[in-house]
Image (cartoon, rainbow, N blue to C red):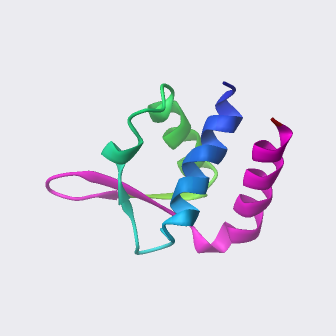
Amino acid sequence: MSIDLEKAQIMRKLTRKNNWGGCYDRLEHFKRFPNLNQIIKELIGLNWIIFHKKPNYKAISLNTKFKKEIIEFIELQIHRD
């Protein structure tokens, strides 16, 4: 599985749960992805993902400023396979 496909799958899961902006999901829910740490770092670098650090857990949500780009990326990667 390519890293771009993993990125798309993570972001797709966030879109399905409507995790945009202040509505976030715990990072532990994505532990099945082998390259999770690298993917999160890359997506934070693109500002596509917002990282929330809480006292008891870490969480992520999608950045609404890049909604169009995120959705296009997901569609391109998911439909490629």
Residue found at x 64% / y 51%: 46
Picture layout, residue 22 above or below residue 30:
below
Identify the residue shown where x is 66% and y is 46%.
8
Please, is residue 70 above or below residue 40 in the view? below
Question: Is residue 71 inside the magenta stretch?
Answer: yes
In the drawing, does residue 19 fall left or right of residue 25?
A: right
In the drawing, does residue 28 fall left or right of residue 44? left
Along the line of sight, the residue nearer the viewer: 52 or 10:
10
Q: How far across and how far down the image is residue 74, in percent?
A: 73, 52
Q: Position of residue 14 (x, y in %)?
A: 52, 59
Residue 27 at x, y percent in the picture: 35, 47
Closer-to-camera residue (43/77): 77
Does residue 8 appear to the left or right of 26 in the view shown? Answer: right
Residue at the (58%, 40%) spot, across then down? 42
- Which quadrant: the C terminus? top right
Q: Which residues are magenta?
A: 52-80
Number of dots carrying numbers: 0
Asked if the magenta segment contains residue 74, the reply would be yes
Q: Name the quarter where the N terminus is drawn.
A: top right
Residue shown at the point (34%, 55%) measured from the top left: 59
| Residue 28, horizontal then vertical, whole percent | 31, 43
Is 77 on the left-hand or right-hand side of 51?
A: right
